[in-house]
Amino acid sequence: DAGVIQSPRHEVTEMGQEVTLRCKPISGHNSLFWYRQTMMRGLELLIYFNNNVPIDDSGMPEDRFSAKMPNASFSTLKIQPSEPRDSAVYFCASSSRDSKETQYFGPGTRLLVL
Amino acid sequence: KQEVTQIPAALSVPEGENLVLNCSFTDSAIYNLQWFRQDPGKGLTSLLLIQSSQREQTSGRLNASLDKSSGRSTLYIAASQPGDSATYLCAVTLFSGGYNKLIFGAGTRLAVHP
């Protein structure tokens, strides 16, 4: 089992540019979560998908952030336009009822917006 | 609003010492509590999951306890080793909005020196 896969692992971009983060959940998992981790705010849930449908996007900070899950094996988190305050580590996690809802985290994408 | 607090924020101990990490939460209506480990530049790994009806869980040198009524959990690490150096995160699961949502503490950064 390859675990949750995220790409890219590191991203450096300039303010105003579009950033797209990608996630492949563990096969068979029907829940997918996007988190953001910063020193100031810790780990925060951005959005939760179940069976490819967004269930809770109340953590998405503003309209510059959007997330999609076109199928069970792929999700994207997009920031457009990016700002320096978006610099953080973005994690994707997946879970299923069979795993007693333990969430399995990917390695994260470290984003730096200059 | 559920808040999760971890004390201490950082801890440095010599190898071989037994240690306790503390976690407190404000709302006792939790589904379960998990302890995660995070290594620098890596994702989170679930160490122990305690269901709300349980009092403790053990895995090797790790033992986690849960006292729901007082809103506290402790992670006990026996005979600490340099390989235990990492950040330990406590998270409670709430059933909110039709799904199980993880609320994280800020973590305890542990350094075990030889």
Image: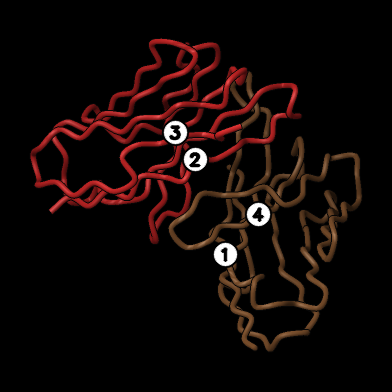
The residue that mark 2 highlights is A106
Name the residue located 46 percent from the left edge and 46 percent from the top edge: A107
Q: CA distance from mark 4 to mark 1?
A: 10 Å
Q: Are marks 2 and 3 on the same chain?
A: yes
Residue B95 in the figure: left or right of residue A105: right
Q: Residue at x 65, y 53 (%)?
A: B36
Label 2: few (<14), some (14–19) or many (≥20) C-alpha neighbours in 10 Å: many
Q: Identify residue for label 1.
A: B87
Q: Quadrant of residue A6?
A: top left
How far separated are the C-alphas under marks 3 and 4? 18 Å
Q: CA distance from mark 4 to mark 2?
A: 18 Å
Residue identified by numbered label 3? A34
Colour of chain B in the rendered structure image: brown
* Residue type, mark 1 in image: Thr
Residue for badge 4: B90
Q: Where in the figure is residue B77, as x and y percent of width and height?
A: 78, 70
Q: Quadrant of residue A103?
A: top right
The residue mark sitting in front, 4 or 1, is: 1
Tell me if mark 1 has few (under 14), some (14-19) or many (20+) residues whose alpha carbon lies within 10 angstroms of its own: many
Pinpoint residue B107: horizontal percent, then vertical percent: 57, 62
Here the colouring is by chain
Q: Position of residue B25 (x, y in %)?
A: 68, 53
Say left or right for B84 vs B64: left
Whether residues under marks 3 and 4 lie with C-beta atoms below 8 angstroms apart, the answer is: no
In the image, are marks 2 and 1 on the same chain? Answer: no
Question: Which residue corresponds to the image point at 36% horizontal and 31% vertical from the top-left?
Answer: A60
Identify the hue of chain A.
red
Image check: A77 left or right of B79? left
Q: CA distance from mark 2 to mark 3?
A: 10 Å
